[in-house]
Image: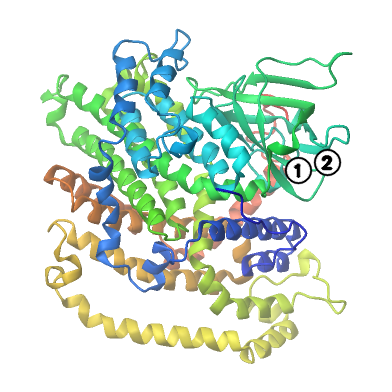
Amino acid sequence: MTSRDTKSPETEPALSTAAQALAAAGDAEQARDVAALDDVATRAAQRLGRAKQSLVERLIYGPLPPVEELGSGARISAQAGETGKDVLDAALGCLAKGEAFEADGKLSTALRTAVSSAGGYGFTVPTEFGGRAASYPELAVIEEQLAANGLGPLAVEISGELTIGAGSLLGYGNQAQQSLFLPMISDGRLMAFALSEVGIGVNAKKVQAYVEPDPETGGFRLFADGARNKLWITNATYGALAGFVVRIGKGGRDVGLFVIELPDADIVRSDACDHEFWLRSSDVDAFQPNHNSRIHFDNFPVPAANRIEADGVEVLFYCLRMGRCMLAAMSAGYQRMFAADAVHYARQRPGVGGLVIKHELPRLALGTMLGGALQARALSHLSLQQDADGVDLAGLRDLTKSAAATTALRSLTACERVLGGRTFDAKSRVAQSRSNMHVFGVVEGEDDLILMGMVKDVTTRFTDRYMAGMLGVIRSINVGPDGKSLPKDQILFRIAPSTAVRHPVRVALATIRLLTNAGFWRLVGWIAGGLVTEVLRLPGRLVPTSWIGRYAGLPKALRPFARYAERKLRGRRWAYLGTNLWFQLDLTRAQIPLQRFGKGIEHLVSMLVLCHHAAAQDASQQAVAALRCAQLKDEFRAIRILSGLREIDAMRVQLERIGADLEDGNSSLVRDLPPEDFAHPFG
């Protein structure tokens, strides 16, 4: 397995329609960032070779996926159940003997040794490199079971080790790199992925750590000092491996990836040593049983052979799809753990009028935990099966992560409502997992931003084909005689009646250009054809769901939810069109409607996937799925898109005022309050 040719770093990425819109809106910097991220995401997808169109995109724009595809993830549990049993037994055996954690709460050496001996750390590594050669679906089953049994930190460690650690080497490493590093991983050596930094956080294209060529050795010197320190790096400890995302040259344009063997101890610069290294705890409240570190390098020597010949951000995109699937599997496990502890308490604790378990509201809380667990599992398993079947995970990978993180936090709250004060016992596993549930929505990207990226992914084809012409016309009237963009305060973001009164000449010019634009008439044709199709579908709304073969294989209680989800997902094409026509170029700044739109898709896809997943399960899980679908339907119906556009605009006006007050230090509620200093100052 050798590294394939990568795109020449000198090639300038073409601007997507979204990037062009950002540039036309006067945000050149964000346009460049989006174009660069689009480019590496495209290359990562090409490397994966995913030829089949995204499931989420087909649910919205057609053709409708077959029923067999929607239920394909349900096979994973049955097929993967026994493969990792010895790994799980080794871990749970340590837990039962009280040997899983050290006195300081960290994962123990005994646990790591036992799990490594069973092949857990090389579970998905090929056998030629000392691994088990198991599949990612099989890993997901183990990850869920570890989290469900109170070993979530071990699941976090192994997930990072195999998805983005070994995964980066398997996807992009050459034969020599794989032969050197993969056996180390299989033997239990931890591997981290060092992307985020003190100064820029997780903004992948803004990394400031860098390498310079070392003429004496032919290798490189690594500089990750001060604000360039790598921060919040899970699995980073003395003696571990780490994939470092760095710039090639200080301030260089290209971003590279190097595998670094972290030294066994800090290194202090001296007459005998020309470089520095130190490692400190990130001091985060989450992932406390794991190693999570801040890393400093200054003039540190790195062999040329340790450079992976690929864009570091491209490798990140390539690997994160599996990371998000594993996060969802862990989320399912954590939520099952919450439910188990809450049920145990509710069945024994007398409440007003009988045991807690007898009352409807505690039962609703318990059902919420079980529903969240089943939702996260169903999405994780379908995503993994889609990946194995060569389907592009655009959209599905992101909403899977968002839904899993959201349900985990909601289940934590539900557990707290049942257990009351006991859930805050410092030694309880619920209390010890609390910070992890909060950070699940942040790790690998903040959920709301991920949802907006998901919207972009699943609507790109439509936008490029049908909306680019209209957006291009608006861009054209925001260009001056010199061919350069007008100042930001002169840019027209929307063409509306009020705009025509203030700028009649520019609006008239835009109207003429629009009517002579082929893309505009293509959009008109799409709208006309779509409306005819919707009218022809109307009589079908009268047909009972039980008569429609597509839903006949589902349990009776789930059929209406599946039908509702598919109908509303088709309707999302009109919601997206309406949002574009309302906001036009202003949609480059309007995050609220895009977040709402993405959340609606998340709810509907989750509902549909739950129905098909539960159809292959027992009656107990089908009841849980029906309850969760009812909750998702309520949550979806509470999101107003087209009918709420005026209210969204009004909200944005107030946000603009509040944001300006905060930015200028004029908010009277906080301006006199001294803030706490940053734990890790940016500079």
Looking at the image, which is closer to me, 556 or 665? 556
Between the C-alphas of marks 1 and 2, the distance is 7 Å
Quarter holding the C terminus is: top right
> Which residue is depicted at the point 57% across and 39% down?
178
Vertical order, 465 against 276 (above or below): below
> Which residue is depicted at the point 21% across and 50% down?
614
Residue assigned mark 2: 250
- 272 sits to left or right of 35: right
Residue assigned mark 1: 247
Specify the quadrant of the image occupied by residue 46.
bottom right
Is residue 224 visible in the rendered structure shown here? no
Q: Residues within 10 Å of mark 2 (few under 14, many from 20)?
A: few
Kind of residue at badge 1: Arg
In the rendered image, the residue lying farthest to the top is 103
Measured from the top left, where is residue 194 in percent x and y? 63, 34
Classify mark 2: helix, strand or loop.
loop
Vertical order, 111 against 157 (above or below): above
